[in-house]
Image: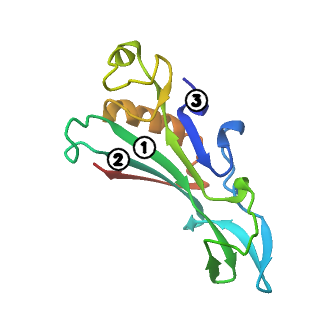
Amino acid sequence: MSWKEMIQVERGADITEMEAPIPSTIGEGFTFCLNGKQYTTIGGYTKGKRDVEFYITSYIGYCGGAEHYYCSISIPVENRNGNTTIGGYHGGIEIPNEYQSFKASIVRPLTKEEAADTERWEWYKEGDMVEAFCSLKELNKCIEMIRQIFPEDKWNVVIKRNI
C-alpha cells in the first residue's frame, strides 16, 4: 500500500494529490483583510522547520472491549498579522480549504477476517478503509512510511502518544 492510500484527509490541502516530498509551504500565502488589517495564512514552525504532528490514541483501558489504536496527522496554519493571530469566524471571509490547517487520519483496509465479525464491523466490507489498527506495531509501520514524505531538513516531525 502506498502512503497516499494510508491518508484520509479531513481538511486542508490534499497532500495525497501531491508528490513526495511534501512542500513545507502548504497552507501558506492566502491573504485577506479584516477590520482594516491584512492577515496572511502561515504555518507553525519550530527552529525554522515546519511542524507536523502524528497523534496516536486508543480507548484501551478506558472503554470495555476496546482493542484498537488510531493516529491523526495535523499541520497547523495560523491567520497572522505581525504578532497578532485570529481564528474562528472571519466576518464572512471564506478561507479556501487548501489554506487551512491540515488534518487527516491514517487508515488501512479491513481484512476478510475482520469483515466476518459483523458485531464489530456491521456496516463494513473487506477492503473498506478504517482508522482502527489492531496493534501499535502495525500502526507504527504506517507512520514510518508516511513520515518519509516530510524530510527532516524542512519538517519538525513530532509523534505524540495518548495510550
Q: Residues within 10 Å of mark 1 (few under 14, many from 20)?
A: many
Q: Are marks 2 and 3 in contact (CB under 8 Å)?
A: no
Query: Residue 75 location in percent, x, y?
Result: 57, 56
Looking at the image, can residue 19 be seen? no
In depth, the one of 76 and 49 nearer the eye is: 76
The amino acid pointed to by label 2 is: Thr
Q: Are marks 2 and 1 in contact (CB under 8 Å)?
A: yes
Residue plotted at (37% across, 25% down): 121
69 left or right of 155? left
| SS assignment at label 2 | strand
The amino acid pointed to by label 3 is: Glu
Q: Quadrant of residue 123?
A: top left
Residue under label 3, please give it: 5
Residue under label 2, please give it: 57
The amino acid pointed to by label 1 is: Cys
Looking at the image, can residue 5 be seen? yes
